[in-house]
Amino acid sequence: MSHAGTPQEAHDGGDAPAVGGSPPGAGRGSGSWASTPAIRKTMLGNRSRDTAPELRVRRAVHAMGLRYRVAVRPVPTLRRTADLVFSRARVAVFIDGCYWHGCPEHYIEPARNVDYWRPKIARNRERDAETTAALTSAGWRVLRFWSHEDPHDVAGRIAATVRTARSEPGS
């Protein structure tokens, strides 16, 4: 499933860092990767799991009576972690942040360090496509949603997919 849908609530800008980021060639041991101390603080506060949009979706899915695993690898040998995993139904769900995954509706390229951020976001998009392809070829249904999508709509689409997968022969 592709990223689709119309935002039903105000965009939660919490998934985007402040303007700036890592300069080219910066890394561990070479000083701060952030262009200012304020940006460093903001970047360090960004979560890779249990984000506000993810928690809203998880609560809505749980309220529908579905149980799932959180932040696990659907395929243990594949270094990719899904946000919600329905193991028996073989459904992997990703809630992608608008900034980090380059949402066409909300992504705004930063004014600083464009030479770092442009390829970084492009690589994230490539990795998302690779992950979807790898999981699909391993027999998984992959659902991807943007963090700005209405959590109840997302939960409904997840529930429908999981219930369909469970009702099919061999599930």
Image (cartoon, helix red, strand yellow):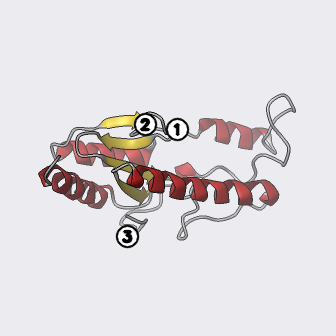
Name the image quarter holding the N terminus. Answer: bottom left
Instruction: Tell me where residue 20 appears, x and y as whole percent.
Output: 76, 52
* Residue in view at x 41 percent, y 35 percent: 72
Amino acid under disc 1: Arg
Q: Is residue 166 left or right of residue 121?
A: left
Q: Secondary structure at mark 1?
A: loop
What residue is rendered at 66% in x and 60% in y? 122
Q: In what element is the residue under mark 2?
A: loop
Marks 3/2: CA distance? Answer: 26 Å
Please name the residue that numbered disc 3 is placed on.
Answer: 5
Name the image quarter holding residue 168.
Answer: bottom left
Please tell me which residue is depicted at 41% across the width and 57% down the height of the picture.
144
Q: Nearer the viewer, residue 135 or 83?
A: 135
Q: Amino acid at mark 2?
A: Arg
Q: Position of residue 38 (x, y in %)?
A: 73, 41
At x 87% / y 32%, what residue is drawn? 30
- Visible residue check, residue 163: yes
Q: Secondary structure at mark 3?
A: loop
Residue 118 image-quadrant placement: bottom right
Q: Is residue 25 left or right of residue 2?
A: right
First of labels 3, 1 by sequence position: 3
* Residue contact at pointers 2 and 1, CB within 8 angstroms: yes
Q: Which of the two marks, 3 or 2, is nearer to us in this view?
A: 2
Disc 1 designates what residue? Answer: 79
Mark 2 / mark 1, whichever is N-terminal: 2
Quadrant of residue 39 within the rendered picture:
top right
> Mark 2 sits on what residue?
73
